Image (cartoon, helix red, strand yellow):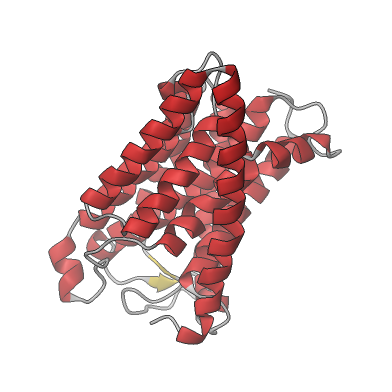
Amino acid sequence: MVPSKLGWQSKLVLLLVVPWTAVSVADQARFWFAQDQAVAAWSLGLSAALGLLAWSLRTATAAAALTGGLINAALMFSMMDPPFRPWRSGLVPVVAVLVLTSLATRFGRHRKERIGLAEKSRGRGAAQVSANLGIAALVMDPTVQSGLVDTHWLAGRTFASILALGLAALAEAAADTVSSEIGQVLGGVPRMITTLQRVEPGTDGGVTMAGSAAGIVAAGMVAGAGCVAFHGDVWMFAVSWAGGVFGLMFDSLLGATLERAGFLNNDGVNFLSTASAVGFAWGVVGITPHP
């Protein structure tokens, strides 16, 4: 049970993600309506439809669906492979995350309900969506992209390098949920990642072989979906997949330490874990040959 005193962390994640993303979407929509109305119409329309679908399927609350639609619009604008096509934009990896996490959440639901670990029937909240997808939207924001490329570490890099960072964050978001949901059903008794001692299912920092394997596969599927959409190569796939897997392990480490100690809640852990996926991918990009 997350201590109520840590609720401020969920609110902070919302304040970090939603206003910035809303301004970014407004600025990019204004630009594209002036340059190419089809880009703006498709991005905003499909994002709204995706949010409505998530809400109607009860995978997200109304506020979460709105937040998710906003983030998807930001990613469709900022993650695209010109000439614009909806299937060559951030829509593809976001949908991959949504499908994988929804299926994993529904998998073995009766067993999860018996042991008290099932997701709330009304779906995920806005803070959960922001914690899982917000870092991808922030790192792909045009202003942030420009700042990253101007750094010595990424100087001279192509847009593919930045796309790999965004994909790493999305890969981690899918890996975390899939790992947890599948592990609760197929993983048996989990072990604490720091001590390898057996712990009760649902314990922060507890991992299973089945859950970890499922999370790694999910990260690869999201990275692969993004690479197909952006016509990426093996390098982009490897960097984004590696970042997602690193973030998955970092998530468990935070759960076993700071979350168990009462310093972080789940939203804080998820936000920092996706950030760690970007950080790891950024490090790999900086030390590997140019794509």
Q: Residue at x 59, y 21 (%)?
A: 34
Residue 110 found in image quarter = bottom left
Residue placed most toward the observer, 267 or 18: 18
Whether residue 209 is visible to the viewer of this picture, yes or no, is: no
Q: Residue at x 34, y 45 (%)?
A: 51
Residue 67 horizontal/vertical position (percent): 44, 52
Relative to 54, 177 lies left or right: right
Residue 218 found in image quarter = top left
Residue placed most toward the observer, 247 or 265: 265
Q: Residue at x 22, y 49 (%)?
A: 56
Quarter of the figure with the C terminus: top right
Whether residue 53 is visible to the viewer of this picture, yes or no, is: yes
Residue 25 horizontal/vertical position (percent): 56, 40
Residue placed most toward the observer, 253 or 57: 57
Q: Residue at x 29, y 57 (%)?
A: 182
Residue 6 to residue 60: above or below: below
Residue 118 found in image quarter = bottom left
Residue 225 horizontal/vertical position (percent): 42, 30
Quarter of the figure with the N terminus: bottom left
Residue 223 to residue 233: above or below: below
Residue 6 to residue 100: above or below: below
The mark total stands at 0
In the image, farthest residue toward the top: 83
Residue 35 horizontal/vertical position (percent): 60, 18
Relative to 99, 71 lies left or right: right
